[in-house]
Image (cartoon, rainbow, N blue to C red):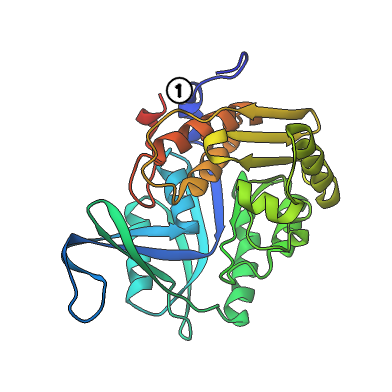
Amino acid sequence: MAAGTRPYSHWRDRVRAGRVLVVGDVMLDRYWFGEADRISPEAPVPVVRVARTEERPGGAANVARNAAALGARTTLLSVVGTDEAGDALERLTAADGIAASLHRDPALPTTVKLRVIARQQQLLRIDFETRPSQEVLAAKLREFDEYVEATDVVVLSDYGKGGLAHIASMIGRARASGRRVLVDPKGDDWAKYRGATLITPNRAEFRDIAGRWTSESDLEARATRLRRELDIEALLVTRSEEGMSLYTDEGAAHIPAVAREVYDVSGAGDTVIATLAALLAAGAPLADAVRIANEAAGVVVGKLGTAIVHPGELA
């Protein structure tokens, strides 16, 4: 840990008093675990004999789940369908201690990602998704204003499923109320994130927007230019095995990756932004929050699927 930064144990009690609002695209992650010991006679594909199934909150719900697991008082605002998967998400988020306001859209099937896993390897993923209606999104925007007043940090988790159609307005409203806004971006239109406090793209997402860089100094120049164009206080690029790079007015700070055996990177970005939100809501400096988020990412990639990090794993 760099000189002057403090470990998670220093902030643990304060995290419990922090309030985090997560808004964005939620989904239900379903896992079918089984054995694949023969090939189908109908096609050259493995036959999986399912032995057990599991359901976990995904997308923005996984962000909320991670923040709640660290102890932050967490609220989730999103849209689901009037269906069994929506019921499952309500049940799962309640069990995780999340105050979830899930608007129901009768015309919207809840987004479900089904993964078939055998011998600890994912064989297949099937996605079921539809964009929510504008009427439901407008109602969510009105409720957003109420929740912002009772929160410390706002997380906008954009998975490109349509749940954040009003994200530019949300950023403006939250910032006008003096709240920090963290954004996990998606797609090639980042103008809608203008004015956010912090954006957390991964390496590929940043490259798609800023172009390829030839050196660390070139990367910093591109990050600085993007921050100024979008009026963003900080930009955190998660770089997989290269760790993380934080760009602010004070310059660039590089945090090496925590050396662990990587098992599954899915959901690691959710853990990073959730940990940042929980620490910033607790009053931690950005430097502390980033280094602890990097540690949390190192823990979660050693777990299968969308997973959470518990405080004891960071102590």
Q: Secondary structure at mark 1?
A: helix
Q: Is residue 69 left or right of residue 10?
A: left
> Looking at the rendering, in which quadrant would you find the C terminus?
top left
Confirm whether residue 193 shows in the render. yes
Q: Residue drawn at (65%, 31%), measured in percent from left and top? A: 286
Task: Please say if 263 is above or below 28.
Answer: above
**Quarter of the N terminus within the rendering:** top right
Residue at position x 44%, y 51% in the image = 266
- The residue at the point 44 percent across, 45 percent down is 66
Most extreme residue toward the bottom is 107
Q: Residue at image x 32%, y 76%?
A: 84
Count the labels in the image.
1
**Towards the viewer: 296 or 275:** 296
What is the x, y in percent for residue 20? 55, 47
Position of residue 264 measured from the top left corner of the image (x, y, whole percent): 39, 47
Image coordinates of residue 116 in percent, x first then y, are 29, 64
Looking at the image, which is closer to me, 130 or 64?
130
> In this figure, which residue is indicated by the disc labeled 1?
9
Q: Is residue 155 above or below residue 192?
A: above
Q: Quadrant of residue 39?
A: bottom left
Q: Is residue 242 left or right of residue 208?
A: left
Instruction: Using the image, determine if residue 241 lies above or below residue 27.
Output: above
48 or 86, which lies in front?
48
Q: Residues within 10 Å of mark 1 (few under 14, many from 20)?
A: few
Outermost residue, top side: 3
Q: Is residue 285 visible?
A: no
- Quadrant location of residue 127? bottom left
Give the left or right position of residue 65, taking residue 153 as reference. Answer: left
Q: Is residue 75 left or right of residue 97?
A: right
Give residue 274's position: percent from left, percent from top.
52, 44
| Amino acid of disc 1 | Ser
Q: Nearer the viewer, residue 125 or 143?
A: 125
